Image: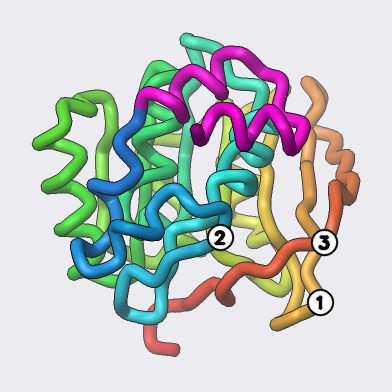
């Protein structure tokens, strides 16, 4: 049913449709809310965080244009669902979550479900994961007011970053491409609504 829903909404990438159809989204949602797991809207997962609606997950994953050789950095692990999707399309996923409890629970469920190519870190996503940089792809699942320069620096030449950017209800989904020479090109890909990206101490 999820695959049919995504196809009806214009998702065409067969690999994205396959992995989203294969991934048990309900296991990444609190038990009390599992009846809503496959509805096309966000679901609260505690600590002010949500698991993004399936359509947005599919759109952002498609925009990354992943290959099996890519190393991906995700900022905002949340429940671990987006990382699970990415892990089936890329070589390695590094994901950073600012809420320690969410990082721990995501790491546990990812391990239990056998997603062995995902590394989870509890920390400030604005800092990225410098010792594992550069990354072929970077995805943000919370909205900064501006894309942190630190993350752009950690993007490999030829790499792509996809992120919601803006304040509160005025956010754009941005696609940032870094050229082989380090040049940056950014385009808007629609309006979105994500929770604000946090900083340590805020």
Question: Answer yes or no: do the residues labelled 2 and 1 have beta carbons within 8 Å?
Answer: no
The part of the chain drawn in magenta is 1-22
Q: Nearer the viewer, mark 3 or mark 2?
A: 2
Q: Identify the residue position indicated by label 1 in the image.
A: 170
Q: Residue furthest bottom?
A: 202
**Residue 108 location, x and y as percent?**
12, 47
**Mostly what secondary structure, the magenta segment?**
helix
Q: Residue at x 85, y 35 (%)?
A: 183
Q: Residue at x 60, y 28 (%)?
A: 4
- Mark 2 lies on a secondary structure that is loop
Q: Is residue 6 magenta?
A: yes
Taking the image as shown, residue 73 lies to the left or right of residue 122, namely right
Q: Quarter holding the C terminus?
A: bottom left
Q: Identify the residue position indicated by label 3 in the image.
A: 191
Question: Answer yes or no: do the residues labelled 3 and 2 have beta carbons within 8 Å?
Answer: no
Crowding near pointer 3: few (<14 within 10 Å), some, many (20+)?
Answer: some
């Amino acid at each position: 049913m999820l695959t049919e829903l995504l196809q009806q909404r214009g998702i065409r990438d067969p690999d994205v449709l396959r992995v989203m159809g294969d991934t048990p989204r309900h296991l990444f949602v609190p038990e009390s809310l599992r009846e809503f797991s496959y509805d096309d809207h966000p679901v609260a997962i505690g600590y002010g965080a949500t698991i993004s609606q399936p359509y947005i997950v599919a759109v952002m994953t498609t925009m990354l244009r992943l290959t099996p050789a890519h190393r991906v950095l995700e900022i905002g692990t949340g429940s671990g669902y987006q990382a699970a999707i990415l892990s089936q399309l890329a070589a390695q996923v590094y994901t950073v979550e600012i809420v320690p409890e969410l990082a721990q629970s995501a790491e546990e469920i990812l391990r239990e479900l056998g997603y062995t190519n995902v590394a989870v870190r509890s920390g400030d996503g604005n800092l990225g994961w410098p010792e594992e940089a550069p990354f072929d792809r970077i995805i943000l699942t919370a909205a900064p007011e501006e894309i942190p320069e630190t993350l752009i620096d950690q993007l490999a030449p030829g790499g792509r970053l996809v992120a919601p950017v803006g304040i509160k209800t005025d956010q754009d989904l941005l696609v940032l491409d870094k050229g082989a020479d380090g040049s940056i090109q950014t385009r808007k890909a629609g309006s979105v609504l994500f929770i604000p990206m946090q900083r340590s101490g805020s």
